[in-house]
Every structure is written in C-alpha cells, then in structure tokens.
Amino acid sequence: MPTLKQLAVESLTHLVEGGQERLAVDDDARGILREWMLAARRGPQAAAPAPVASPAAPEMSVEEKLELLRSKAADWKPARRLGTLRETMVFAVGNPHARLMLVGEAPGYEEERQGEPFVGPAGQLLTKILGAMGLKRDDVYISNVCKFRPSMGENQGTANRPPSPEELAACSPLIMAEIRAIQPVCIVCLGGSSAKGLLGTQQGVNALRGQWLECQGVPVRVTYHPSYLLRNEALSARRALWEDMLCVMQKLGMPISEKQQNYFR
Ligand code: URA
C-alpha cells in the first residue's frame, strides 16, 4: 500500500508535470517538501520512496512517455508565463533507449531554426566528440535543461544568452521527467547551466568535474560545454573534456583503444 508520502509526491509530480506553478502551503509543509526535494536530488538512498507510477504509466512505452512530454513541453506554462523565453520549443533528439544522455543548457539560434538540440557550431563539435568515442548521435539521447531559447529582445539576431535561474527552474520538471522516462546508465552535463538545472548546485564546472554525482539515482558527470572549447582551443581544455568522456566510456563498459586513451596528450 502506498505511504502518505508516496501519494503526496505522486500528486505533486502530476501537478508540476501538468504545468501547475504555485500551491499554497503552510510553513510546516514547506519545510517537509524542501527536505524531500533535497533528499531526492541526493539520490535514491537518501530520497523519499519513489513516487508511485501513475495508473497509465506501466503500459506506456518510453516513446509514448516522451511524446507526451514533448506535447506538454510545447505549451509549458511555467516557462511561457515568465515572458523571457522565446516562442519555439526545442525538445530533444536521439535514441529513447540510449544508455547515455547528454544535457546542454538551452537551444541557440541554429537549434531554434532547425527545431533540434545541438545542431549549431557547438553541436557539430559535440557530434565529433561522440564520434571520437565511437558513438553516433542516434546512439545517445541529447536534450537541454531549458527547452526555449532565452530571449534578448527584438534585435537579438543570432545572439544567445544562458538561461536565468528562474528559466532553469521553470523548465527543470521536463528534463527530470525525461530522465525518469529514459533511465540512462549515466548522464553528461554539458556546462554549468546544465549542472545547475540537474543538480541544483551553484558550483561551477571546474569544481564539479572529475567526480561522479547523482541526479534521481543516475550517475552524472559534469564537463565543459562544447562552446567553451570553441572559445578556448587550449590543448589542456580539450584533454580535460576528453578525460571526462573516457570516464563516461568506462562507466558504460565501452572498450577504450590505446589511441583513444592518448587523444590530446
Ligand atoms: N547549446 C546548448 O546548450 N544546447 C543546444 O542545444 C545548443 C547549444
């Protein structure tokens, strides 16, 4: 029989995934909810029991769950209400059964134009990095914490800006639901915004790199955003990102050749 806690978590999850943004609670309830939220971010050992699946969930395939999420995202009221994000929703791309999930920050000019994450210059570099790992884009699942390109007003042109904390918070239920649907073996956070959105941390990439963290029980590796490498061509930065990817390959049980081991040395 589900506990009171499980029922409360399930009801709240449904409200959030349905786009509800606000709920009146007293101070005691706020304290309890905050404790649950922090425990859930730490992972399953520390978390409240997992929410009970909704009655429809067991029969839904991953593809169906993602399709449902995609349609919810298209009219995602918490994001729309902010009025600071652009109109076009860019969801995710790749394999719903992927063992590796990569999460960036938000679509940019090219992603908004093509309706697909990571297709601009940073995306092309990401595709090359995946290639060096022996993976194709179709082998992995690629998404963003923020599903809309952050707005910079009328004369934005091709310029992009990182999402604000409010924009990340508004979109985070979507990426959390994607993680629950995909259940990857591990996740790579590309850049600081992604880490903020997934891990609720204020720390930057340099402090977060080099360790396994956790989001909803899934191991997470934080690394540099490919756009950082486009701005900083130092061999040390490329080697650092590549070392993170070698750890990811190891976690996935992928073979690593001597050539791969020695890239950027
Ligand atoms: N940068 C991101 O973080 N995501 C994209 O989809 C494109 C560029």
Image (cartoon, rainbow, N blue to C red):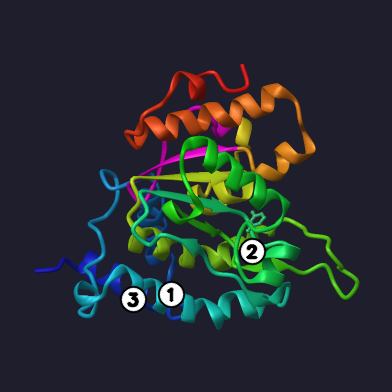
The segment highlighted magenta reads 207-223
Q: Secondary structure at mark 3?
A: helix
Q: Quadrant of the C terminus?
A: top right
Residue 65: x percent and y percent?
A: 35, 73
How far apart are the two marked residues, 1 and 3, measured between alpha carbons? 9 Å
- Tag 2: residue type? Glu
Kindly tell me whether residue 103 is visible in this rendering.
yes
Q: Position of residue 89 (x, y in %)?
A: 61, 75
Q: Look at the numbered disc 2 and say if its residue's Cβ is closer than 8 Å to ligand 1.
A: no
Direction from residue 29 to residue 243 in the image, left or right: right
- Compared with 21, 142 (above or below) is above
Q: Is mark 3 within 8 Å of ligand 1?
A: no
The residue drawn where x is 23% and y is 70% is 53
Label 1 or label 3, whichever comes before in sequence order: 3
Circle 3 residues within 10 Å: few <14, some 14–19, many ≥20: some
For the residue labelled by badge 2, is the local secondary structure a helix, a strand or a loop?
Answer: helix
Q: Is residue 22 visible?
A: no
Q: CA distance from mark 1 to mark 2?
A: 20 Å
**Badge 2 is on which residue?**
166
Residue 64 image label:
3
Residue 23 place in picture, x, y as percent? 46, 77
Q: Nearer the viewer, mark 1 or mark 2?
A: 1
**Which of the two discs, 2 and 3, sits closer to the camera?**
3
Quadrant (top left/top right/bottom left/bottom right) for the N terminus: bottom left
Q: Position of residue 257 (x, y in %)?
A: 43, 23
